């Protein structure tokens, strides 16, 4: 665990809401809302060090120096389908963000990711991409999504997940050492079906009420 490169966002509100999400009694409506709330709080944390520059602004009273964001613009890239559950939370905080979509599902037999969709902003190379997916399990989906984004020209990528297994963090660290990973929790391990333990079950099914 100690050699894993990962940022755990330990904010009490995030941890409290994550506990509610883990509870198997939490239904679709609350699960979806909690994920959106946590995603917004996580986005607040990951943008904490965004660069600022000073500009002149004329208030109704006087002219003064004041700060605005500078540096790369953001695009949010949810990994379909469960990543969609994190999109609104981030976009609520960064309304001007562009949105790309990467469609991947994990084959239940092989646990390998299968790509089925990719649509990205045309200036992908000039933006910082925030890839969102609640679950980082084997790491296969996230690593494949990042491969694809780099093939399309992405140069600056952040991965934001809710719950991660150490195995998945290791896979992404090794495949993409340049990608900073942010999570709300590093859980214990994976079970024989590639599910995160203790985790929260199948995130996509719980967000969309499918089974
Ligand atoms: C889940 C999850 C991740 C992936 C994680 O998606 O949202 O994308 O599994 O597993 P991995 O790290 O082992 O690749 P899933 O394949 O269930 O598809 P869904 O989002 O459409 O439900
Ligand atoms: N995908 C999920 O939705 N949950 C897990 O625990 C692992 C992969």
Image (tube, grey):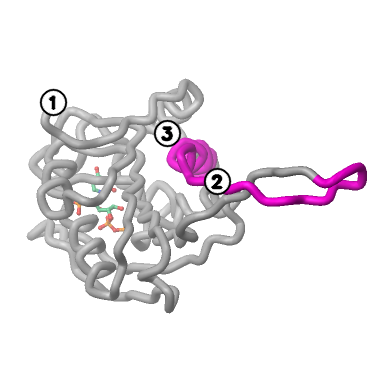
Q: Circle 2 sits in a helix, a strand or a loop, which is it?
A: strand
Q: Circle 3 sits in a helix, a strand or a loop, which is it?
A: helix
Magenta segment boundaries in residue numbering: 35-63
Q: Is residue 24 above or below residue 116?
A: above
> Which is nearer the N-term, disc 3 or disc 1?
1
Say few, some or many: other residues with alpha carbon within 10 Å of mark 3 (under 14 / 14 to 19 / 20 or more): many
Query: Considering the image in quadrants, where does the C terminus appear?
Result: bottom left
* Residue 137: image tag: none
Say few, some or many: other residues with alpha carbon within 10 Å of mark 1 (under 14 / 14 to 19 / 20 or more): few
Q: Nearer the viewer, residue 13 or 4?
A: 4
Q: Is residue 35 visible?
A: no
> Which is nearer the N-term, disc 1 or disc 2?
1
**Which residue is pictured at 48% across the width and 45% down the height?**
50
Q: Is residue 66 rendered to the left or right of residue 129?
A: right
**Which residue is pictured at 29% across the width and 73% down the height?**
153
Residue to which mark 3 is pinned: 21
Query: Considering the image in quadrants, where does the N terminus appear?
Result: top left
Q: Is residue 82 above or below residue 114?
A: above
Q: Circle 1 sits in a helix, a strand or a loop, which is it?
A: loop
Residue 35 in picture, x, y percent from top left: 47, 42
- Location of residue 126 (image quadrant): bottom left
Q: Is residue 131 rendered to the left or right of residue 2?
A: right
Task: Give the number of marks.
Answer: 3
**Furthest residue toward top:** 12
* Residue 2: image tag: 1
Residue to which mark 2 is pinned: 52
Residue 85 in picture, x, y percent from top left: 46, 52
Q: CA distance from mark 3 to mark 2?
A: 35 Å
Q: CA distance from mark 3 to mark 1?
A: 26 Å
**Which residue is pictured at 44% across the width and 50% down the height?**
207
Q: Nearer the viewer, residue 188 or 47?
A: 47
């Amino acid at each position: 665990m100690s050699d894993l490169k990962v940022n755990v966002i330990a904010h009490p509100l995030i941890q409290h809401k994550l506990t509610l999400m883990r509870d198997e009694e939490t239904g679709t409506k609350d699960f979806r809302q909690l994920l959106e709330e946590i995603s917004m709080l996580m986005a607040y944390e990951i943008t904490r060090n965004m660069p600022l520059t000073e500009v002149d602004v004329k208030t109704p009273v006087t002219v003064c120096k004041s700060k605005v964001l500078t540096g790369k613009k953001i695009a949010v890239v949810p990994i379909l389908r469960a990543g969609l559950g994190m999109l609104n939370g981030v976009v609520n905080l960064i309304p001007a963000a562009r949105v790309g979509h990467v469609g991947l599902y994990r084959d239940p037999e092989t646990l390998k990711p299968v790509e089925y969709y990719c649509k990205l902003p045309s200036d992908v190379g000039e933006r910082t991409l925030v890839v969102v997916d609640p679950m980082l399990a084997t790491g296969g989906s996230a690593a494949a999504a990042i491969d694809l984004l780099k093939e399309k020209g992405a140069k600056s990528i952040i991965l934001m997940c809710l719950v991660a297994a150490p195995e998945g963090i290791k896979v992404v660290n090794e495949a993409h050492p340049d990608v900073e990973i942010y999570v709300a929790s590093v859980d214990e391990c994976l079970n024989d079906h590639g599910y995160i333990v203790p985790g929260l079950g199948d995130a996509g099914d719980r967000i969309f009420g499918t089974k």
